[in-house]
Amino acid sequence: MVNKEVSQYPNSAAIYHPNKCCLSSIAVILLFPSCLVPALALDTHGLDCVIEPRMTVELSSPVPGVLDTILVERGDHVKKNQVLAKLRSGVEEANVSLVRTQAELTSEIFAAQARLDLSVRVHGRTSELYKDKMVPLSEADEAETKKTVAEFELKKAKEDKQIAHLELDRATELLKQRVLYSTVDGIVVKRYKSPGEHVDDQPVFKIAQVDPLNVEVIAPLSMYGSIRLGMEAEVQPEQAVGGKYSARVVIVDSLIDAASGTFGIRLALPNPQQKIPAGVRCDIKFK
């Protein structure tokens, strides 16, 4: 009895099993290898994916305090090192002003220099008189000692000025800790605190970096080895967003999930104009 299902291949030398009314899979592979191409293309090139932020950061204050000013709101685009908020810092600002004034003072150095100049002149005259036996040795020793002390006093005045500059740097850094800066270029996703609230170790902002974006793909084990770093792919966000974009493979997981027989792939998707939103599903085709 001839299987009617294979009548669509009238010119093929079909192989029949005497006890089964089906075309042998071996015959299909040998006689019609081209029929496998569309299925393989679908399995290895058309995959679902998710577009996610490059990273998400929750910013908090390095020191406890009370929020004084909030400079950004949810949805605002921010740049790296941009000021986002400030804590009350009147004491720290006054301390910076005090230490800066101390660091700028030069009167101690001038006074020490004048005492040294005098000591040098006295020591020179005393030394000449001592050579002529006109002053005792004790007086010459005293002049030498005063000169040495004056040199150390000048050195100490200069060291004190250096320490004052270091204290200014320290006070300035303490003041900077009262300011919250963005650590990435991105978008403010959430603001947790308001002016007047106390901040300790709780986050104040959540910021998402959206350029570039991450495209996360879960691929079947059959694709392992065919996806390489640097490979390009075409990403098509879901219909509401639309468009087609080029991305590049940056991570190929070397750990296979045995339960599902899949592995992860991450691609970097440039988003300089930030037109592509994060958190949407997409389709991806590897070139």
Image (cartoon, rainbow, N blue to C red):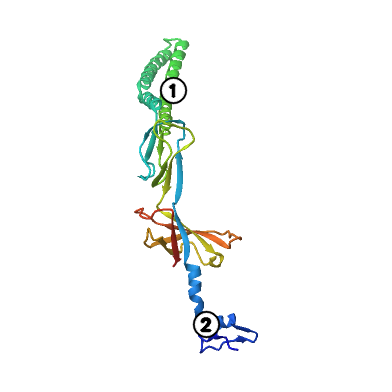
Q: In the displayed structure, would residue 119 be above or below residue 56? A: above
Q: Is residue 163 left or right of residue 33?
A: left
x, y percentage for residue 114? 36, 19
**Along the viewing direction, whichever of 136 and 86 lies nearer the viewer:** 86
x, y percentage for residue 201? 49, 35
Q: Earlier in the sequence, mark 2 or mark 1?
A: 2
Give residue 32's mark: 2
Amino acid type assigned to the residue bearing label 1 in the image: Lys
x, y percentage for residue 77? 36, 46
Other residues around mark 1 within 10 Å, as few (<14) / some (14–19) / many (≥20): some
Quarter holding the N terminus is bottom right
The answer for how far apart the CA atoms under marks 2 and 1 are is 94 Å
Say which residue appears at 57% left-offset and 86% top-offset.
3
Amino acid type assigned to the residue bearing label 2 in the image: Phe
Say which residue appears at 65% left-offset and 85% top-offset.
19
For the residue labelled by badge 1, is the local secondary structure a helix, a strand or a loop? helix
Q: In the displayed structure, would residue 142 be above or below residue 260? A: above
Give residue 156's mark: 1
Say which residue appears at 41% left-offset and 26% top-offset.
164
